[in-house]
């Protein structure tokens, strides 16, 4: 019997790649995202028996509830939640950053993630399922301009550890996957569409691909049920840890 994954942010990047990878592995996928046309293209490509499109903005809890209530019988028994939807906005230092950007990151990366997790926990507990939260190395290793984005990802990683502690004895597994530099639409979103900045960041760097992370998500999801990976930090070989900053007068 096939299992069912609920993947947020399924219209691009890690979520899109994970949807393809899980369907290829024989899973059903609830593909959640804001862009209806992209979701429909996924359904058309992979088949309505394999993918159900759940079109809503994760920041809209009422729309989230409506989408969950509308899940067809064949997609309602969720075995895996992949909290992938998230974003970074802006690269400015805190004193010059946009408060609206900060609030959007908090609403998306934190509030929406915990809301969806809370909604699906009863099903995940009943089915002894898996929660995989996509965090970031930015939640562990600070850097200039990371400010609220790094803070939100630190929350995701710590929430995941505490969630696992609360779920002790239920059989539910909880993992954070913490990627480093990965070439997706991430930098385009962060820079509000600056293609040149995105190209410059990834040029000749051999970054992580969306497919690389999709493979790690599938690996964690299909581990034997007695094993739990608490945190999985993944970086490209070309990326390592920055030195400490020193300001000299």
Image (cartoon, rainbow, N blue to C red):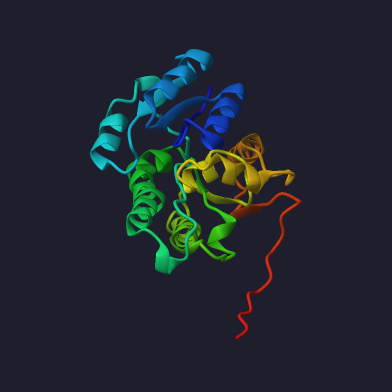
Question: Can the viewer see residue 225?
Answer: no
Horizontal side of 233 relative to 41 (left or right) equals right
Q: Quadrant of residue 242?
A: bottom right
Image spot of residue 130 (x, y percent): 50, 42
Indicate the position of residue 30 as horizontal and vertical percent values. Answer: 43, 28
From this view, report whether residue 72 is shown above or below residue 234: above
Residue 161 drawn at (x, y percent) = 50, 59
Q: Nearer the viewer, residue 242 or 109?
A: 242
User: Is residue 77 placed above or below 198 in the rendered structure?
Assistant: above
Res. 244 image quadrant: bottom right
Location of residue 86 in the rendering, given as x and y in whole percent from the top left corner: 45, 46
Name the quadrant of the C terminus.
Answer: bottom right
Residue 230 falls in which quadrant of the image?
Answer: bottom right
Image height of 246 relative to 91, above or below: below
Residue at the spot x=58%, y=39% of the render? Answer: 184
Q: Residue at x 46, y 21 (%)?
A: 51
In this view of the protein, which residue sits in the foreground, 209 or 90?
90
Task: Please give left or right for residue 92 compared with residue 57 in the image.
Answer: right
Q: Nearer the viewer, residue 43 or 103?
A: 103
Residue at 64 percent across and 48 percent down: it is 201
């Amino acid at each position: 019997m096939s299992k069912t994954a609920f993947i947020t942010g399924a219209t691009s990047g890690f979520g899109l790649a994970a949807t393809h990878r899980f369907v290829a592995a024989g899973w059903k996928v609830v593909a959640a995202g804001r862009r209806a046309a992209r979701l429909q293209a996924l359904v058309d490509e992979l088949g309505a028996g394999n993918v159900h499109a759940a079109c809503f903005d994760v920041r809209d809890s009422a729309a989230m509830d409506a989408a969950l209530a509308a899940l067809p019988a064949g997609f309602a028994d969720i075995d895996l939640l992949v909290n992938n939807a998230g974003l970074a906005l802006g690269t400015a230092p805190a004193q010059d950053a946009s408060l609206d950007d900060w609030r959007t990151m908090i609403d998306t990366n934190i509030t929406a993630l915990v809301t969806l997790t809370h909604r699906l926990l009863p099903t995940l507990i009943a089915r002894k399922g898996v929660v995989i939260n996509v965090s970031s190395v930015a939640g562990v290793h600070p850097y200039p301009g990371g400010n609220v984005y790094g803070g939100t990802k630190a929350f995701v990683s710590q929430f995941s550890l505490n969630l696992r502690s609360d779920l002790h004895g239920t059989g539910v597994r909880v993992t954070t996957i913490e990627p480093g530099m990965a070439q997706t639409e991430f930098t385009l979103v962060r820079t509000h569409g600056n293609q040149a900045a995105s190209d410059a960041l990834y040029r000749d760097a051999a970054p992580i691909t969306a497919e690389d992370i999709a493979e790690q998500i599938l690996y964690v999801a299909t581990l034997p049920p007695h094993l739990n990976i608490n945190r999985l930090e993944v970086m490209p070989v070309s990326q390592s840890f920055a030195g400490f900053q020193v300001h000299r007068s």
